[in-house]
Structure formats: C-alpha cells, structure tokens
Image (cartoon, helix red, strand yellow):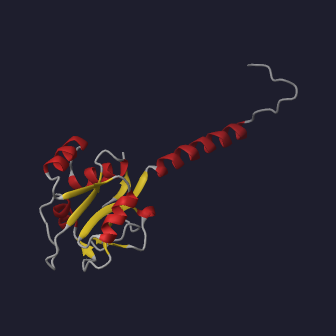
Amino acid sequence: MPRQKPNQPKITHVTRCRRLLIVMWLVGACCLVQAKQLAVVADVANSATNLTTAELVNIFKVRTQSWPDGRPIKLVLRDPSCTDMQLVLRKLLAMTPEQAQAFVRAHRSSLVIAASDDAVLKFVATNPGSVGIVDLFSLTKDVKVLKIEGKLPVEQGYVLRGNTQ
C-alpha cells in the first residue's frame, strides 16, 4: 500500500463512493443531453392541428403533396447529416443518411433544405402550407406545433422524441 503524505487527507470508502456517484451522475447527464425532442411545425394559418404518424411519413416522403384544404405542402428539412435529422431518419422515415441524401437529390424540387432551425422556422412562418421539424427549444410564436397521434412533443410516446444515437 502506498504511503500517505502527512498533510494529505485520508481517502475513505465513503469518499470513493461519493466520487463514483459523481462520475456516474456526470455520465448520466451526458446521456440525457443526447435525448432530443423535436417538433413538427406548420404556418399558423394552417388548419391542420393533428396528424397521424402515417400522414406525417407520407408528407415527409413526398407522397402527400397537399393539405386537405387543397393548399400545396412545401416541405422544409434540415440537412440529412445533421444530428436532429438522424432521429427523424431513424424513427420516422426508416432511411440511412445515404438513402436520405439520395432522396433529397431525387426530390430537390419538392423540398427546401434549411441550414438551421431558425431558417426552418422563418421559412415555415412566411410560406403558407409549409411544414418542417425543429428542436423543441427553438420554437417561436410564429409557427404552430402540430400534434402527432394526438400528442405534443413534451408528451410520453411522441414519435419524434428520443436519442439521436
């Protein structure tokens, strides 16, 4: 056993346990940082308030191109390689990043690719019929959050809630 210096406090079992708990708490906090809550947003004048997961998938796969009132849907996406889109690709579209890049190239005329959540929000707010996905903490009053299967992003079971990994 190594010799302890005279002025150094003795490391006890309790001290080791406390240090271990602190490290475990820090690791847990880092894992929580990876948890994402995304929101599907539309312009405030949009009559839609609730979509099924299937309807959302059809909109994001450009199968549904107009709202029930006949207005055309303009889809705004972040780059498929960004962290938030990884969750969307996995949970909603069942695409790999490579498949998503090919999809974007094939549907360039039907999609708008935005550089940031702010850009998504600005486009959706100023273009009637547009829809996008942003981080929950980026929301502004200029857009409307759509429910998915009757749930808001903060509710348990919301489809776009989870880890980005």
State the image quarter where residue 112 is shown. bottom left
Q: Residue at x 51, y 46 (%)?
A: 30
Residue 42 horizontal/vertical position (percent): 30, 71
Q: 60 or 46: which is nearer to us?
A: 46
Residue 131 horizontal/vertical position (percent): 26, 66
State the image quarter where residue 141 is shown. bottom left
Answer above or below: position of 163 versus 13: below
Number of numbered discs on residues: 0
> As drawn, which residue projects farthest toward the right?
6
Q: 44 or 109: which is nearer to us?
A: 109
Residue 91 horizontal/vertical position (percent): 27, 54
Q: 70 or 127: which is nearer to us?
A: 127
Does residue 157 appear in this view?
no
**Left or right of residue 134: residue 56:** left
Q: Residue at x 81, y 23 (%)?
A: 4
Does residue 21 appear in this view?
yes
Residue 15 horizontal/vertical position (percent): 72, 39
Answer above or below: position of 84 versus 43: above
Quadrant (top left/top right/bottom left/bottom right) for the C terminus: top left
Q: Residue at x 41, y 63 (%)?
A: 136
> As drawn, which residue projects farthest toward the front?
126
Q: Residue at x 23, y 44 (%)?
A: 96
> As drawn, which residue projects farthest toward the top?
2
**Left or right of residue 3: residue 114:** left
Quadrant (top left/top right/bottom left/bottom right) for the N terminus: top right
